[in-house]
Image: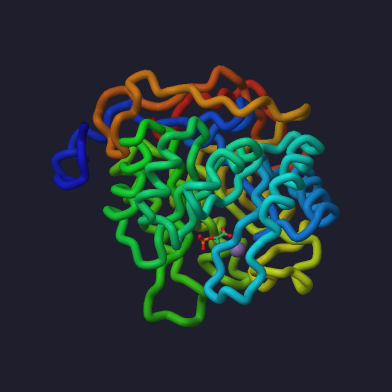
Amino acid sequence: MLHLLEPSRSSATQQRAGTRSVINVAGRVAIGGRSIAIIAGPCSVEGRDMLLDSARAVRDAGAVMLRGGAYKPRTSPYSFRGLGEEALDILADAREATGLPVVTEILDPRQLERIESVADVLQVGARNMQNFALLSEVGKSRKPVLLKRGLSATMDELLLAAEYVLAAGNPNVILCERGIRTFETATRNTLDVAAVPVLKSRTHLPVIVDPSHAGGHWELVEPLALAAIAAGADGLIVEVHPNPSGALSDGEQSLTPARFARLVERCGAVATAIGRQVAVPKSGAAATASVVRAPNGAKSAVKSGAKSGVRLGAKAGVIGAAPASVVRDASRSVEEPWPA
Ligand code: PEP
Ligand code: MN
């Protein structure tokens, strides 16, 4: 197994063709291929109607996966900390109603069994990036893990955190740049756009960006999303709320569904400009989440030079520069890793 302790030595073998991992989410979404996956939904699940409305709205606008926190890590214990169990049931209903796979955050290793029964992707949040017990626990799962970069974590630390998950047996990790803490106070965090190409040069794992927690204000979300795609991000995770001003968490950085639809469309234009496309949702109910092991077991988060990653047999639709909801090109396969 290659480790990051000698990053320059391992990075020397990283540029060979076919070394990127493409992660299959529930047989419906491929992350890390040529298509860019846009995940969207509210910061927190606040109730049934609001989540179902949000899920339908983001699906119709072009999201391929639904986000929504059931358990929220809040700075103050007196802030809204999520509906917990009830939210998990609501997420399951939204999944059923829309066919969108679900990503939700796990805070505690004891929650794994219950959250796994609903989630297609397990989110490990920025505040838990170095919760090694949690990383090892999600490493035992067969569900992909969305690992967010810690508030003050270096890229090496993020990759080593991913290594914990891989070392425990789960090769399906999606890295997420969500802004880091710097001296700058004009934005909630500072989006480290350079993390996208740097991480992609150092690991075979897909890299997505969260422009919502980076910018902290809805007006910044679209420009940061476009920058992320231009920089090579394999996907986005975006907060969308039907009524941002009434949100119980992160309303100021949440997009309305209409603004989100515009974001998807503009992302399609940037994707086209760099030879990619934005994935469009498949119709029909979500399949049971399935995770296929990488052919070589994807033993390390750092590219080994050996072929690694999960290949999908399914074709996916894409979005080009034209309106998100109408362009479908099933001829382009998501099997192909990008860049090779
Ligand atoms: C979230 O996605 O709602 C969240 C809490 O993100 P982060 O862990 O990046 O702060
Ligand atoms: Mn949030």
Q: Nearer the viewer, residue 322 or 18?
A: 18
Q: Nearer the viewer, residue 76 or 197?
A: 76
Residue 222's x, y, as percent?
A: 61, 61
Left or right of 331 in this view: 92? right
Q: Residue furthest right?
A: 49
Left or right of 162 in this view: 228? right
Residue 252's x, y, as percent?
A: 67, 73
- Image quarter (top left, top right, bottom left or bottom right) of the N terminus: top left
Asked if one can make out residue 258 in the rendered structure from this viewpoint, the answer is no
Q: Nearer the viewer, residue 62 or 148?
A: 148
Way the structure is coloured: rainbow
- Image quarter (top left, top right, bottom left or bottom right) of the C terminus: top left
Q: Residue furthest front?
A: 110
The structure residue drawn at horizontal position 80% and vertical position 61%, both measured from the top left corner, is 242
The structure residue drawn at horizontal position 65% and vertical position 50%, both measured from the top left corner, is 67
Asked if one can make out residue 211 in the rendered structure from this viewpoint, the answer is yes
Residue 156's x, y, as percent?
A: 27, 53
The structure residue drawn at horizontal position 25% and vertical position 28%, both measured from the top left corner, is 305
- In the image, residue 221 above or below residue 6: below
Residue 230's x, y, as percent?
A: 49, 51
Left or right of 295 in this view: 38? right
Q: How many marks?
A: 0
The structure residue drawn at horizontal position 50% and vertical position 58%, both measured from the top left corner, is 227
- In the image, residue 311 above or below residue 174: above
Ligand 2 quarter of the rendering = bottom right
Q: Quadrant of residue 21?
A: top left
Q: Quadrant of residue 138?
A: top left
Left or right of 262 in this view: 119? left
